[in-house]
Amino acid sequence: MSAASPTFAAAPSSPALERPLAARRPTIAAALPREQEARLRAIEEKVAAGERLGFDDGLFLMRTPALHRVGRLANHERERRHANRAYFVVNRHLNPSNYCVYDCKFCAFFRRADDPTGYRLSLDDIRRLARDEFEPDLTEVHIVGGLDPKLPYSYFVDLLRVLKEERPQIHLKAYTMIEIEWLARLSKQSIEQVVDDLLAAGLGSCPGGGVEVLSDRVHQAIFPNKLGPAQWLDTARRVQQRGVRMNATMLYGHIETDDELVSHMLQIRALQDETRGFMTFIPLAFHPDHTELSHLPGPTGLLDLRTIAVSRLLVDNVDHIKTYWIMQGLGVAQVALRYGADDVDGTVVDEKITHEAGATSPFGVTRSELVRLIREAGRDPWQRDTCCTRAELQVSP
Ligand code: V47
């Protein structure tokens, strides 16, 4: 089912698609000049006193050479909230179609309408998949796909219904704000009506993808046709007010600046103050292969760890920080559990979006492998349900 990756012409020359000079990353150092040392101490004291960090604090943490101190601070905060637990879920991904009307420059997964390498699963395909291929201990299906103009509104609703008919116990984490807004336009209904239809069909919660970076500049440069920051926030607010919980992601390691990442985290934090509907915050590491941004190097392991740590410290009102091992790699994910992350997503199975863009991580791991990796990192593996309302220690793999 997985289609061959498309190739793109030579890297675009537009300055908007380059990394800005302001995005240069610091080198790592243990000792700091006196003024910076005082600044970091002040932040450490704020965290110890339970005081909220601000924009300037976040920017300092994104730039200080003392990365490992930032990690230690985030780890302290993570252990205060979750002790030695590392949560995971037994899940799999389902991408119903890769045809998409949008053409985001960071995406290698989508296909244009006339591309023979595209695919579209029928509802019968999905029923067969659920019947024959879903693992017996699966608790969550993560559903996200392209905005395929050939699929009617009823398909998106019936897809949930079919899965619930086959496997009623499984939680359906389905459709990003991009899809929800598309479905509202497609059906000429309000966001609220769409959410009600999806809930009636079996929607459990929404995944956090599609937000990318909440910055008008980045929006214009790399995903101008898709929802921008204001519309994404408005849609998320309305979906949460309808009673649906969701995650929030942040795509980093492309053309964004540190200011834009910090601003993104604070915008999610501000919405969470209002709605309390976000379950998990998930930094997503950009993979450049076969995208229109393939001239960019993508993030390093150090940026992965820094982004996790700063997320833990800034997004103080979202309970969980997830290291998405598919994108960050299993090795970084293990270290991230000591840099602020308390969740390692899941078994995943059949991941396509990142692998189309050159990911070298496995397509999924078994539950016992995930348990082993968590234990090796010195954490206690706690299997959870999607909304983390139930979690239990895994005594044996
Ligand atoms: O929306 C697309 C991103 C997202 C690339 O909610 C890319 O629990 C890196 O949102 N390199 C899909 N990232 C994945 C996602 C997700 C993953 C795990 C858990 C949850 C959750 C959500 O991946 C897309 C987009 O933001 N993406 N292309 C790329 N080349």
Image (cartoon, helix red, strand yellow):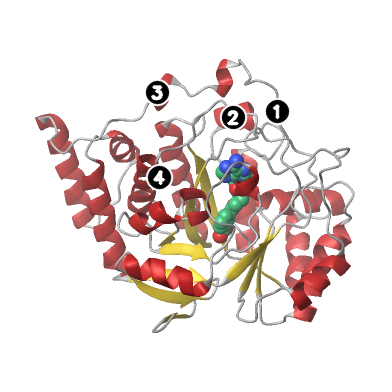
Label 2 and label 4: CA atoms lie apart by 19 Å
Element marked by disc 2: loop
140 to the left or right of 155: left
**Residue under numbered circle 1:** 8
N-term mark: 2 or 4: 2
Label 1 and label 3: CA atoms lie apart by 27 Å
Return the residue nearer the eye: 100 or 315.
100
Check disc 1 and give the amino acid type: Phe
| Label annotation for residue 22 | 3
Could you say where residue 6 lies in the image, as x and y percent from the top left?
A: 73, 36
Quadrant of the frame with the N terminus:
bottom right
| Label annotation for residue 294 | 2
Could you say where residue 61 lies in the image, as x and y percent from the top left?
A: 29, 40
Check disc 3 and give the amino acid type: Ala
Check disc 2 and give the amino acid type: Ser
Q: Residue at x 75, y 74 (%)?
A: 130
Label 1 and label 2: CA atoms lie apart by 8 Å
15 to the left or right of 352: left
Element marked by disc 3: helix
Check disc 4 and give the amino acid type: Asp
**Residue under numbered circle 4:** 304
Q: Residues within 10 Å of mark 2 (few under 14, many from 20)?
A: many
Label 4 and label 1: CA atoms lie apart by 26 Å
Tell me where residue 358 sits by quadrant. Answer: top right
Quadrant of the frame with the C terminus:
bottom left
258 to the left or right of 211: left
